[in-house]
Image (cartoon, coloured by chain):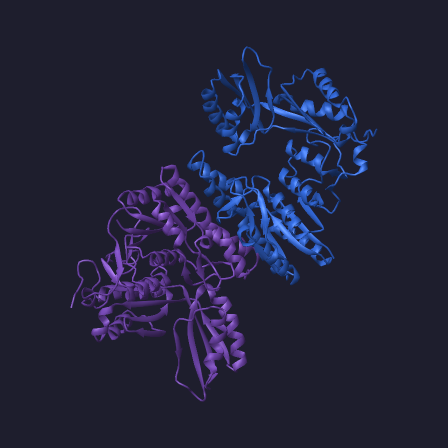
Chain colours: A blue, B purple
Amino acid sequence: MALVVQKYGGTSVGTIEKIRNVARRVARTYDDGNDMVVVVSAMAGETNKLVALAEEICEFPSEREYDVLVAAGEQVSVALLAMVLQSMGYKAKSYLGWQIPIYTDNAHTKARIDEIQDANIHEDLRSGTIVIVAGFQGIDRDGNITTLGRGGSDTSAVAVAAALKADVCEILTDVDGVYTTDPRIVPEASKMEKISYDEMLEMASLGSKILQIRSVEFAKKYDVVVHVRSSLNDNPGTLVMKEDSDMETVLVSGVTYNKDEAKISVLRVPDQPGIAARLFSPLSDANITVDMIIQNVSHEGSTDLTFTVPRSDFKKALKIVEEAASKVGASGVESNESIAKVSIVGVGMRSHSGVASKMFTTLSTEGVNIQMISTSEIKVSCVIDDKYTELAVRVLHEAFGLDKGQLTQE
Amino acid sequence: MALVVQKYGGTSVGTIEKIRNVARRVARTYDDGNDMVVVVSAMAGETNKLVALAEEICEFPSEREYDVLVAAGEQVSVALLAMVLQSMGYKAKSYLGWQIPIYTDNAHTKARIDEIQDANIHEDLRSGTIVIVAGFQGIDRDGNITTLGRGGSDTSAVAVAAALKADVCEILTDVDGVYTTDPRIVPEASKMEKISYDEMLEMASLGSKILQIRSVEFAKKYDVVVHVRSSLNDNPGTLVMKEDSDMETVLVSGVTYNKDEAKISVLRVPDQPGIAARLFSPLSDANITVDMIIQNVSHEGSTDLTFTVPRSDFKKALKIVEEAASKVGASGVESNESIAKVSIVGVGMRSHSGVASKMFTTLSTEGVNIQMISTSEIKVSCVIDDKYTELAVRVLHEAFGLDKGQLTQE
């Protein structure tokens, strides 16, 4: 008998009929003798509907109230799933974020979980109750509702699994697992049996939309085995887990892309100590995550700074940067929303050289100009014009031997 | 400077545009120098939509989960109203039931408020913040969400006004005030300037849908002046307040009707002590309110018992009564959903005789058969076939001199 946490996304609970399917699957796992905690998202479309209402009011609604608003979505789905399970004869009970409670910091709309009190859930599990937890939401220490950002239900699930020391955290989704790249772009993409936390972290942060990045960080920190699998069948999916020796034999595990960023360049910034801080502090104060940052070689006492921000924060970021730029005496600000980031990821890179240059050569052969480059131990990313995204992904997938049936191990 | 509690119903907050209207009215009262607490219902149609989802699952969904589900409606509207006020430059903050908290008993779907902690609200008011409170919802002492039943936002508003010792509780609605009867049936009906708590209690409980009955009980208990007025204009409405000497000069203040009940008769119940308790205890255990009860004279050791229940509880009640009836040895159960209750109400009745017989005569002259009668100090009610409802209301309204321009004072 194991303790299983299952997470179902919005598509899986989009109608009462689909919720019945979820309930049947939950019940099956329960009947197999497992304790069950189920984390659910809002019914598909509901969050968007609520966000649209907020946007009808103003461009930047109060983030505290925004969280109150959108948290209503999961409140509906947990109640419905509990009702369905009860109507099938199971004991079930819903929990909202504040009822557990799931404590977070107070960064509204993108809060981080810092504590989960699990006493009530344990008591329910002991009595044979299936526990349904609202994903995506928590409360701060002052009792305000917070939300964890898009995809936050994944993090809720992994954090609950970590707190309860669950045996596995199953993420039931509309894909079969984690693929070497987006199969919509490269039909030859293949499903990975397993992937390390670090690789998944790079995949997630680079735009592979399967898991929210924080859920993987959480899983890594607390060593939670995450099983990404289809909600529509019983096929095994992909295990996200600690690195093992098999994984290192593969040079590149996957190719990812991300069209959710925008580029901002601050031109002719005086090259003085402290300038970067004066530009980036206001962004971090506004909770905007800056991704890639490039500073060119100084030229006549000034330098150009280029960086990327999430497209959803782009307008807000641009406004902040324009103010900061004029204060520090920069000559101007340029921006571009038509960019994409293409990356290759793999723990095998650590022990193999020449991976980055192979990537640059592959792209240049196809005439794709590289605007920015950033690298880490296990990934190389290039920012390119977004019209080349699909082309770049296809040629890289093939160049690194990821096309189905031609996996090269070294 | 006063402390004003305003309550807006679902129709008033049905769209963002309507919420803007509400915000403008709230802002106007605030700008006049008042402290403001605003209680809102769910956007029109939302609660019904949520209830329909629950009904798609099963006939009697878990009441705990039902409350979690429907409470999501008000969560949306409070957040939206706070956002609109903030976008207009006002300080505003939303509160859900559990955030105040508004404590209730644990009678899910029809809970009663037993305590409101007002410290946080007072602190916000001191800082000039407009406080927005989710109507209809509270929590029990175990932290489960509860709801107060249809119309519960009225009770939330009055209870909040009582707790905060507000100067007035304005119920903004789609009618101008309390009328002598339903103007859709009797165009000559006129708006009352004021009405006593007791009269309003009879009017509310008898089917005048303007205020939830518990809100009036609360108002009476804590002496809260309730101002029922239109959300569409600034005309004074009707004050619901302590009885004064003016009120007693009017024989009958209003005529009301109620088509929301159903009649159940238990036939040939053995006429023994304790039988009534054995029939009605299971109903009260199921939180079903029995309204009128009539027991006929005993005949050959058995008697017939007839009573009415809310139509919404009818199926549930019938099932319970059928079980109980067979246990006590009754010969059968009959039921009828096609009934209506027509009533006359007025504190003036206390000091005038002959009011009831005038009512019976008026009805019989029109050929309306009376099935059940019940009376209190300030009202007389008759159950009739529901097809005669409109006729009965019209003739009673006229007979007691309530038609506009012919108000008789004695």
The answer, for residue B40, to whether it is visible in the render is no
The answer, for residue A157, to whether it is visible in the render is yes
Residue at position x 52%, y 70% from top?
B319
Residue at position x 71%, y 31% from top?
A181
Tell me: A140 left or right of B128: right
Residue at position x 73%, y 58% from top?
A33
What is the residue that sits farthest to the top in this orientation?
A300
What is the residue that sits farthest to the right in this orientation?
A410
Image vertical order of residue B245 relative to residue B71, above or below:
below
Image vertical order of residue A286 relative to residue B247, above or below:
above
What is the residue that sits farthest to the front in this orientation?
A273
Q: Of B15 and B342, which appears nearest the observer?
A: B15
Tell me: B209 left or right of A114: left
State the image coordinates of residue A92 (x, y, percent, origin top left). Answer: 61, 59
State the image coordinates of residue A303 (x, y, percent, origin top left). Answer: 55, 16
What is the residue that sits farthest to the bottom in this orientation?
B300
Assign the C terminus of chain B to one quadrant of the image.
bottom left
Number of numbered tags placed on the structure image: 0
State the image coordinates of residue B37 (x, y, percent, origin top left). Answer: 35, 50
Q: Of B363 and B372, which appears nearest the observer?
A: B372
Residue at position x 42%, y 74% from top?
B307
Image vertical order of residue A378 relative to residue A218, above or below:
above
State the image coordinates of residue B51 (x, y, percent, origin top left). Answer: 50, 54
Q: Quadrant of residue B212?
A: bottom left
Tell me: A168 left or right of A60: right
Q: Of A403 and A285, which appears nearest the observer?
A: A285
